[in-house]
Image (cartoon, grey):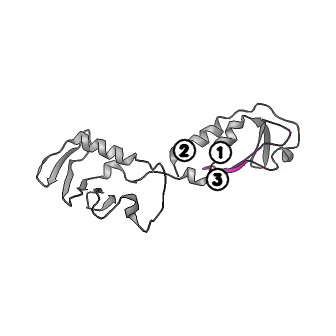
Amino acid sequence: ADAELVLGLIKTVKGERAIAFPKESSAALVEKPVVDATFSLESGAKVRVRYGRPQGDAGKTFVLHETEGKALLAEVNPAVSLALDKDPVELKDRSVLHFKPDEIARMQFRLSDGSEVVVRKTVAADAGVAEEWEVVSPRQGPAKKWKLQSLLWALSSLKASEVAEEVPRDWNKYGIQPRSRSVSLLDGNGRELAK
């Protein structure tokens, strides 16, 4: 799941304050909930919240908060139920690559002409020592570490704007071919962490 989105939803619910506490039957006000959400706490306790918009109460939204056998009914801002009314696909993490930048020890860039550029980390980024990078091939030499660090940050924060197909039969229709440019990210043991 998209951690930022989920945390945002939790903050929205946590920060909500009641507008009023109605005296009507709670069952009638949340009979057909717009949102029915259950939160599991680290302690094992469960909190269930049901948001309803009964007919005849135009513009009003009610929430029934239930936990450990106790229930509380309140009128709340209608925007909160809209914030929780999400399609599960919207909650999916849209990160394109999953890796920890500090685990990357080597990067292999394959160009469209089939040639490769390989760079490797020469100094670990610990004990206050800045990491250094060097070009291994096609010719050895120092690499521009700030460009490589910037590239790693960009790759780690890359998000999909849309998911077309999970496993397409034909990658060509998306412009991905055997000779397409690529970058492989490897750890110190040569294991590919992302591509």
The kind of residue on which mark 1 rests is: Leu
Measured Cα–Cα span from mark 1 to mark 3: 22 Å
- Tag 2 residue: 5
Residue toward you, 145 or 87? 87
Task: Specify the farthest residue to the front.
Answer: 173
Q: Residue at x 68, y 39 (%)?
A: 80
Q: From the viewer's perspective, is 42 left or right of 125?
A: right
Q: Say what secondary structure mark 3 lies in.
A: loop
Q: Residue at x 20, y 59 (%)?
A: 113
Place of residue 184 in the rendered image (x, y in percent of width and height, measured from the top left): 29, 57
Place of residue 143 in the rendered image (x, y in percent of width and height, measured from the top left): 17, 45
Measured Cα–Cα span from mark 1 to mark 2: 11 Å
Query: What stretch of residues is rendered in magenta?
Result: 31-56
Mark 1 Cα-neighbour bin, 10 Å: few <14, some 14–19, many ≥20: some
- Tag 1 residue: 84
Q: How many marks?
A: 3
The kind of residue on which mark 2 rests is: Leu
Label 1 close to label 3 by CB (< 8 Å): no
Magenta stretch containing residue 157, yes or no? no
Q: Earlier in the sequence, mark 1 or mark 2?
A: 2
Visible residue check, residue 85: yes
- Tag 3 residue: 44
Q: Earlier in the sequence, mark 1 or mark 3?
A: 3
Residue toward you, 28 or 18? 28
The kind of residue on which mark 3 rests is: Gly
Mark 3 Cα-neighbour bin, 10 Å: few <14, some 14–19, many ≥20: few
